[in-house]
Image (cartoon, rainbow, N blue to C red):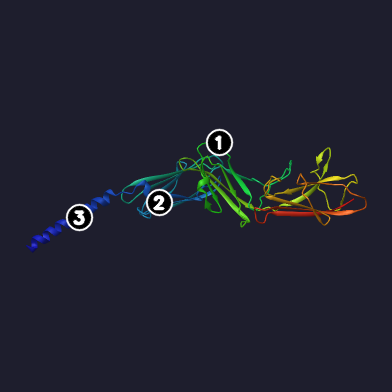
Amino acid sequence: MSMMKNTKILILFSVLICVFSAFSVNAQVKNADVSLILSPKDPGANETVSASISSFVADLNKSFISWSLDGQTVIQGVGQKNFSFKTGSDNSQTSIDVKIDNTDGSSITKQIIITPAGIDLLWEAYDSYVPPFYKGKALLSSEGIIKAVAIMNSNKTSGALYNWKADDNNKIDSSGYGKNYYIFQKSYLDKNNTIEVNVSNLLGNSLGSGKINLANGNPKIVFYKKDSTLGTQWQKALEDNSRIDSNGETIVFEPYFISPKNLNSSNLNISWTLGNSPISTPEIKNELSIRPESSGGASKIKISVENIKKMFLSASKEINVNF
């Protein structure tokens, strides 16, 4: 009886060995079991890139691995898991293929196609004030609104997916198909911000990336004279100790880089001081008409501008004028 029992156990054990052996033979490594990774993830034009493969299923250290660049085998060997190459110029394609012959007899191929498009990442201070005909760029202000736009140096923008990041944080709501711009408001706690965009096609192939660093600008006030015929003389700032015509003149101040750009906004508190006395804000808030009562005198003009809704967003300036 005991011998019969032992015989049954041996038969069951043999069956289990056959089952597991069959399972081991059939459980071959699949394409999805191997990952092909690039560093950097979104390479640009003429950039050195490192490619590597990894797997939790296959023993790649024992596999025969062959790397091809644009259809030409470049390097091969047992355990050859890493490969370095250089991308081409803007809009050129670079094809990376890796073939893996596993010890279980299976063979798989992974491919990545890179088309660096060259991304120009531009920005504008969406609500930063500059006077008319100003040829420079409006600078950022504390808690200002910024718009970043990704412009591809390519005709392959159709179907492009844009992935935006601000200070290393993914901005999922602002990312996606055709979303080539990103709008955000700076925090008064941030002196600098880093904006990044990665662009890919619908197949997941990289089309390029861009990155900019943004720093706050400081609002400043500049005084000008306003001619009754020619208008504001923006070509020449009114300097300290300038002379005011005895027939009277109009002085204009321009609060560069203040926010909002609408000077009539209720968020802006504008205060004029003439001499040492505050005066009522004129109907046109950034213009003050002065008519000297006598010649040979002098006075001090001071202006202060403050955004009452935002912290640390104010500017002031004073000048002396002679009559």
First in sequence, mark 1 or 3: give its number: 3
Total tally of numbered discs in the picture: 3
Callouts 2 and 1 close, C-beta under 8 Å: no
**Residue marked by disc 3:** 16
In this rendering, the label closer to the viewer, 3 or 2: 3
**Residue marked by disc 2:** 77
Amino acid on which the number 1 mark rests in the picture: Asn
The secondary element bearing badge 3 is classed as helix
- Percent position (x, y) of residue 102? 34, 50
- Percent position (x, y) of residue 313? 68, 54
**Disc sitting over residue 134 in the figure:** none
* Residue 229 occupies quadrant: top right
* Vertical placement of residue 176 versus 307, above or below: above
Q: CA distance from mark 1 to mark 3?
A: 60 Å
Amino acid on which the number 3 mark rests in the picture: Leu
Given the current orientation, which residue lies at the most extreme bottom position? 2
**Residue marked by disc 1:** 155
- Percent position (x, y) of residue 230? 82, 38
Identify the residue shown where x is 8% and y is 60%: 4
The secondary element bearing badge 1 is classed as loop
Instruction: Pick the residue in front: 4 or 129.
Output: 129
